[in-house]
């Protein structure tokens, strides 16, 4: 007969087994061989909510998969070469897309459009064909245009679910918390800033007035902080001097957003984070994608929060964001049409 403590251990194991068995979450990374894709794949390998990891790239994914697969977490990792995209997508619940070219010094994210638009369109078409219910997390820039491209591609295929398509703007949120913490001598966990709008220069709208540490920042310090959050990516592009843009901090941000979504898909309540989604907030102005605080749930987007009270400065930032964002969205839609 089992002792009371042994019985407790068996019951706990059974509970762990049944809950993990109900959470069969296969995650795919498309562009897994790249600067973002490699560390992102590693971070996802360490996430206990990922049960299976499918790594795809036109170059190098099997090697990355073999390497990452030796990390001692329970998930299985498989790498797929260029001609095995459909196999890579079979049964996936979440697809993260960092495929495409990054910026070089002097380039804007929009300069990447010509190359990345078709990469993202073709990958989205494959997801629509093989895993139409998957949640798609778009990292490839320009996010303001690539998300509408994914949506329009899925719409064409008759499988667009607006609750399942996300532009990953988390790096802006990560930077805002880090930079604000730096000037207020605080812990970034205490300086979380909602960042809304889009993901490029003036379309990035940090709402410092909605945070305890940020609301007292004014004048030149405020202007500089806003500029640094909006153009933080340029610091990395310049420092890398032609070798690309943010990869490590982006992998961290991508893993953070994926983890938030997986927790919500697994039933955790109250998971709220900014993300660029199909949104009603400014749809009356012809802007039907927007990033605001979004509550995630078991089926992806659960509730899109409004912006809340804005300061006069933030109102101005928003006014600068909207026309630019509108252009970026229309460019993405026109590409698919
Ligand atoms: P990278 O050039 O190091 O890696 C891109 C990878 O995509 C390469 O391994 C390449 O082989 C692969 N690829 C190209 N075409 C493909 C296809 N059709 N299917 C599958 N894989 C394909 O670039 P990096 O630095 O990893 O950046 C990737 C993207 O992420 C860029 O567009 C960059 O602008 C964007 N980015 C987005 C950020 C965000 O906050 N959302 C932040 C930083 C970068």
Image: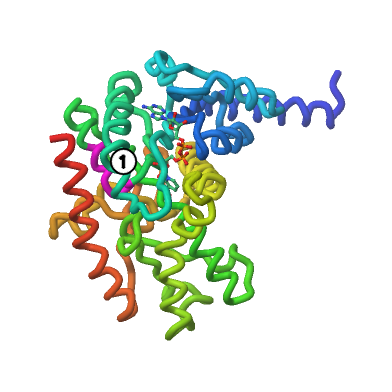
Whether residue 172 is visible: no
Residue 192 counted in the magenta span: no
- The count of marks equals 1
* 269 is higher (above) or lower (below) than 173: above
Tell me which image quadrant ligand 1 sits in: top left
- Tell me the crowding category of disc 1: few under 14, some 14 to 19, or many 20 or more residues within 10 angstroms, Cα based: some
| Residue that sits furthest to the bottom in the current view | 219
Query: Which residue matches tag 1?
Result: 163
Residue 144 counted in the magenta span: yes
Residue 113: image quadrant is top left
**Residue at 38% in and 51% down:** 275
Please state if 203 lies on the left or on the right of 337 as rendered: right
Whether residue 284 is visible: yes
- The residue nearer to you, when weighing 194 against 41, is 41
x, y percent for residue 195: 40, 62
Residue 321: image quadrant is bottom left
Chief secondary structure of the magenta span?
helix
Q: Quadrant of the C terminus?
A: top left
x, y percent for residue 122: 29, 26
**Residue at 45% in and 30% down:** 31
- The residue nearer to you, when weighing 264 against 142, is 142
x, y percent for residue 266: 49, 37
Q: Quadrant of the N terminus?
A: top right
| Colour pattern | rainbow
- Magenta residues, as a range? 142-151
x, y percent for residue 232: 46, 61
Q: Dot 1 lies on which element?
A: helix
- The residue nearer to you, when weighing 185 against 220, is 220
**Residue at 58% in and 67% down:** 190
**Residue at 49% in and 38% down:** 262
Q: Is label 1's Cβ within 8 Å of ligand 1?
A: no
């Amino acid at each position: 007969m089992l002792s009371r403590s042994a019985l407790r251990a068996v019951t706990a194991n059974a509970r762990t087994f049944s809950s993990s068995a109900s959470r069969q979450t296969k995650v795919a990374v498309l562009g897994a061989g790249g600067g973002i894709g490699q560390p992102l794949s590693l971070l996802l390998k360490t996430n206990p909510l990922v049960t299976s990891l499918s790594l795809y790239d036109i170059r190098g994914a099997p090697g990355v998969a073999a390497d990452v697969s030796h990390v001692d977490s329970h998930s299985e990792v498989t790498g797929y070469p260029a001609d095995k995209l459909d196999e890579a997508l079979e049964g996936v619940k979440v697809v993260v897309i960092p495929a495409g070219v990054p910026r070089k010094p002097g380039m804007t994210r929009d300069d990447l459009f010509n190359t990345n638009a078709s990469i993202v369109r073709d990958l989205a078409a494959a997801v629509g064909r093989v895993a139409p219910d998957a949640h798609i997390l778009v990292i490839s820039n320009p996010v303001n245009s690539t998300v509408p491209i994914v949506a329009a591609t899925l719409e064409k295929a008759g499988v667009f679910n607006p609750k399942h398509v996300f532009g990953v703007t988390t790096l802006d949120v990560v930077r805002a918390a880090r930079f604000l913490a730096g000037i207020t001598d605080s812990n970034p966990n205490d300086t979380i800033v909602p960042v809304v709008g889009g993901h490029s220069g003036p379309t990035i709208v940090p709402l410092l007035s909605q945070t305890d540490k940020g609301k007292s920042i004014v004048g030149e310090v405020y202007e500089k902080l806003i500029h640094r959050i909006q153009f933080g990516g340029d610091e990395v592009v310049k420092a890398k001097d032609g070798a690309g843009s943010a990869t490590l901090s982006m992998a961290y941000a991508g893993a953070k957003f994926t983890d938030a979504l997986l927790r919500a898909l697994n039933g955790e309540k109250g998971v709220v984070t900014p993300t660029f989604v199909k949104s009603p907030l400014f749809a009356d102005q012809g802007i039907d994608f927007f990033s605001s605080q979004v509550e995630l749930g078991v089926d992806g987007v659960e509730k899109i929060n409004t912006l809340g009270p804005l300061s006069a400065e933030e109102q101005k930032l928003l006014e600068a964001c909207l026309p630019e964002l509108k252009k970026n969205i229309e460019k993405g839609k026109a590409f698919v049409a």
